[in-house]
Image: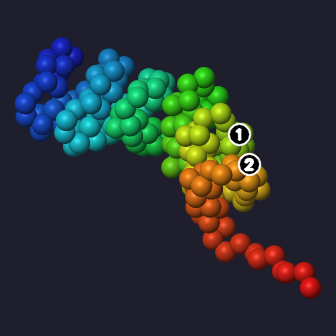
Amino acid sequence: MTDIEELKEKLASEDYEERIATCKELEEFSDDAIDLLINTFNDENPHVRFQAAKSLSQIGTPAIKPLIEALKEDDVRVQKYVILSLKDIGDDTVATELIDSLSSDDFAIRKFAAKALGEMEVKSAVDPLIELLTDDDWGVRASATKALGDIKDKKAIDPIKKARRAATGDKDYKKVANKALKKIDPKPKKKKAKK
């Protein structure tokens, strides 16, 4: 059997197919492989990055906390693959950890945790996401709004409308809010004009 050091060398191979195969082999090493696979999200080849995400989801629960920590990376590509891994793990632990991450001091973690919860359509995240509609960071507010739209819980309609009203002069946020509202309630009831 190959040891972890050999696999680390194989991840540096010029041949992307060998790097993909190495990601699959790393699944057997569980805890020892997690950081190596997360670092592979920086690989130049999208197929290798995708396999690293799939391998992390195969490792499952032990990978959750390191993946959430990796959301801090200031690289959208890394964050995208972290979210892909977390969605594929998709158990209650992921949802709980992501909901806990919504109160992180780091705005990037709040933003991407909100995005992941929306993509996973986690109903239990609705209340904490509503709280983020007043976050100091624009990106966090926008991600929370989009996530609420993805979850499609009508409970979010009034808080989104309130946040939209509070966003005086912010046309970009209003577009995000309007899209989310349309997802939640595609055919809202029109108020009848008073005679």
The answer to whether residue 171 is seen in the rendering is yes
Judge left or right: residue 127 versus residue 86.
right
Q: Secondary structure at mark 2?
A: helix
Along the line of sight, the residue nearer the viewer: 172 or 68: 172
The three-letter amino acid code for the residue at tag 2 is Ala
Judge left or right: residue 53 versus residue 14.
right
Quadrant of the rendering where the N terminus is positioned:
top left
Q: Which residue is most to the top? A: 5
Task: Tell me which residue sits at (60%, 23%) in the image.
Answer: 105
Q: Crowding near pointer 2: few (<14 within 10 Å), some, many (20+)?
A: few
Tag 1 residue:
134
Judge left or right: residue 56 versus residue 168.
left
Residue 165 x %, y %: 74, 54
Along the line of sight, the residue nearer the viewer: 176 or 39: 176
Task: Tell me which residue sits at (62%, 42%) in the image.
Answer: 141
Tag 2 residue:
166
Task: Tell me which residue sits at (60%, 35%) in the image.
Answer: 137
Residue 55 x %, y %: 31, 35
Q: Counting residues from the N terminus, which is met first, the one under dot 1 or under dot 2?
A: 1
- Circles 1 and 2, Cβ within 8 Å, touching? The answer is yes
The three-letter amino acid code for the residue at tag 1 is Thr
